[in-house]
Amino acid sequence: MKKFSDKDILLAGVGVTKVFGYGKKKKTAVREVDFAFHKGEIISIVGESGSGKTTLAKMLLGLLKETNGRIEYEGAPRRLKGHKERRNYWKDIQAIFQDPFSSFNMFHRVEKLLRDCIALQSLELSKEEERRRMIDACSFVNLKFDELYNKYPFELSGGQMQRLMIARIFMMRPRILIADEPTSMIDACSRSTILDMLMKLREENGMTIIFITHDVGLAYYVSDTLYIMEKGRIVEKGPAERVILQPQHVYTQQLIADVPKIHEEWNLA
Amino acid sequence: MSRKLADLQPELAPEPLRRVLEVEGLKTYYRTRLNEKVFAVDGVDFALEEGKALGIAGESGCGKSTLSMSLMGFYFPPLYYGEGSISIGGIDIMKLGKERLRKQILGREIAYIPQAAMNALNPTLKIIRFIEDLMKEHQPKLTKPQVRAMAEERFRTLHLAPEVLDAYPSELSGGMKQRTVIAISTILNPKVLVADEPTSALDVTSQKAVIRLLKELLDKKFIRSLIFITHELPLLYHVTDDIMVMYAGEIVERGTAQQMVFDPVHPYTKRLMGSIIVPEEGMKDHKLSAIPGAPPNLKNVPEGCRFAERCDFAREECRSGKIPMRVEAGRTYRCIFGVDTLKEWYADEEVQR
């Protein structure tokens, strides 16, 4: 069990709230959420559909602006005003999404998709160095660059695309990775492969990974800390072992009881 | 239940389990743009007994969804029928014409629920209209109030609110829509219900409700048997009696759910079951097994065992000839090695870890 001290806090939020709509149609998607994510920590935010977990993820990424509350990055309030500030922030925080098909520009070949990662980091590299980095990234995820570089995204299989997405993360080397339902579209075997790769990535550069998922088993298996969300609120948080094996909140207990297990009876009532 | 009945009425002793569905040597293929045949289901044999639930597991692309669509006997290009027979209640449905198949078999003998079944509902129609449509085709003599009474009763027995019948699909939640579709498609009491990933778009609470509904349909004998396809193995374990594992268009192992999850024989099943993640004590220290590589391209399947390329235990002799199903020590699987040999290897592997 890893211990994290307050010194290592990378991303923190106090009273973060997101409200959609106005007047009568006002809907509070995320309600006064507090969190603190540390360096090298693996966090899972677990909740059912409609619990606000994706909205929270989008706020963390800076794609949505919080209505209330504040988000701090490296101890100072996060500023995302200008183009330059956003660009710097997104160098440090990256995301992978559930549907790999929608995350690639379908008009670009694989080579261009990977080269964009280098361009984003504004590195001045020679042609050979660029190529070497792309080959490295592909071999990290067990893809062969020579076979793929000339292909368009739709020519790849789902698993290949998911891995290519991780190759991009490998090239960007962000400090925080947000994985929004990264494995819900793929089968159990490929899930293990993807998880292995993400864990390897974390060991290499001490990345913080935030999983957004409804898969309780996955959350328990990979993460150090769990946040359980219900209707926009965080109802329970704590070390994964404690939250799963001794849940305190009624909702968490219900959620864990609903998941089919293999060594215990599954109560259908 | 059946035993008690037999005690009271000795002349009604339990008959041996009747086979509801029998599939023999079924081959179906996709035709590509280049006019190649890709056999997604390549020689599948299995039988399903009355009252049983059979699970089909496997990686994406192993042919489990194609198999489930093929069972309907209704083929849409680019999927074509190759050879083999599908008998439901003793009738070979592949010998029937398309029109007879549609009128007599689909919905009555066998029903199919695809993954995104809830999207099958036309958003401009109330739920009751779907049932009326169905009845117009299959039981044209029923009047509208009769259909309604019947639908209401069915919904009530299945613990679904009858008010749903007057709702538009957009007024229902995802899980409710899914359950409604299942209720509608089983209203003619089909012998076989094929459910292809019915829960994978739902969260755990709605998933549980759908499973409860499927179990209820089986218990109340509205359906005689269930074929359940999912890649979520813990779920499969709880829902089904038997599990069949497919790989590259072939069945590689079949056994009871208990055997398959805790004591798999085939190396592929072993790896597949090693990738299960559940929120249970001790799970965190468990090492997940990942299978290197990808399934073979079905356009040119390798000679011999199709899994050999990715198998840690593959030998030279695995790569030639056709590997038949092997029945040994009460297990059915497709491998050239005996149960004891494989078990020994698994034990060695465990030690090495």
Image (cartoon, rainbow, N blue to C red):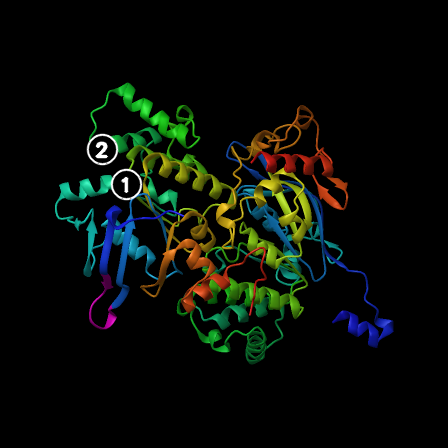
Q: In the displayed structure, does residue B292 sit left or right of residue A209?
A: right
Q: Secondary structure at mark 1?
A: loop
Residue A59: percent from left, percent from top: 25, 54
- Determine the residue positioned at 36% across, 29% down: A137
Residue extent of the magenta highlight: A16-26
Quadrant location of the N terminus of chain B in the rendered image: bottom right
Tag 2: Cα neighbours inside 10 Å, few (<14), some, or many (≥20)?
some
Find out whether the residues at labels 1 and 2 contact each other: C-beta distance under 8 Å. Answer: no
Which picture quadrant has residue B192? bottom right
- Determine the residue positioned at 58% across, 70% down: B135
1 and 2 marks on the same chain: yes
In the rendered structure, does residue B15 fall within the stretch colored magenta? no
Residue B266 visible from this viewpoint = yes
Q: Is residue B263 above or below residue B99?
A: above
Q: Secondary structure at mark 2?
A: loop
Could you give the CA–CA distance between mark 1 and mark 2, rounded to whole angstroms?
13 Å
Q: Label 2 lies in what chain?
A: A
| Foreground residue among A184 and B160 | A184
Task: From the image, tell me which residue sits under label 2.
Answer: A121
Q: Residue A241 shows which numbered tag? A: none
Mark closest to the chain's N terminus, 1 or 2:
2
Task: From the image, tell me which residue sits under label 1.
Answer: A175
Residue B35: percent from left, percent from top: 55, 33
Amino acid under disc 2: Gln
Q: Label 1 lies in what chain?
A: A
